[in-house]
Image: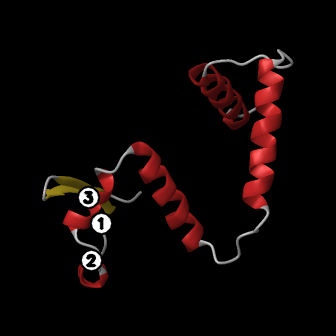
């Protein structure tokens, strides 16, 4: 299990996995973004941060399916209609996660 390190710099809490000294030094030396820039982005309105997050994540996957976003919007539209028309029953996220964890834990139990 990796140990985590947390520290505060310029009022920004940063968490990262402990790396060996040479790797940690290389990490710091390759960072081109300043903590001030990160703080500036975190201060953006929620909608702008969400847009920025989508763009950053998309930039990490060079093999992105161009139709994926359209397909996701179709699924979201369909699911929204099903909810509005009472075709499905929604339940709280906490309850859903509890059920999933229970099923996973049951699988892990020796028979």
Quick one: label 3 or label 1, which is nearer the N terminus? Answer: 1
Q: CA distance from mark 2 to mark 3?
A: 25 Å
Rendered residue at 61%/19% (across/down): 92
Quick one: label 2 or label 3, which is nearer the N terminus? Answer: 2
Q: Position of residue 67 (x, y in %)?
A: 79, 63
Foreground residue among 61 and 21: 61
Above-or-below relation of 24 to 103: below
User: 10 Å neighbourhood of mark 3: few (<14), some, or many (≥20)?
Assistant: few
The quadrant of the picture occupied by the C terminus is: top right
Mark 1, residue position: 18
Residue 39's tag is none
- Contact between marks 1 and 2 (CB within 8 A): the answer is yes
Quadrant of the rendered image containing residue 85:
top right
Mark 3, residue position: 40
Residue 24's tag is 2
Q: Secondary structure at mark 2?
A: helix
């Amino acid at each position: 299990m990796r140990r985590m390190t947390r520290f505060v710099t310029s009022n920004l809490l940063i968490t990262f996995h402990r790396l060996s000294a040479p790797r940690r030094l290389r990490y710091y030396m390759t960072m081109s973004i300043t903590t001030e820039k990160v703080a500036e982005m975190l201060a953006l309105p929620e909608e702008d941060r969400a847009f920025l997050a989508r763009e950053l994540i998309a930039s990490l996957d060079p093999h992105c399916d161009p139709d994926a976003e359209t397909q996701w919007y179709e699924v979201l539209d369909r699911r929204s209609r099903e909810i509005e028309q009472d075709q499905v029953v929604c339940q709280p996220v906490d309850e859903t996660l509890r059920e999933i964890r229970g099923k996973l834990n049951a699988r892990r139990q020796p028979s």
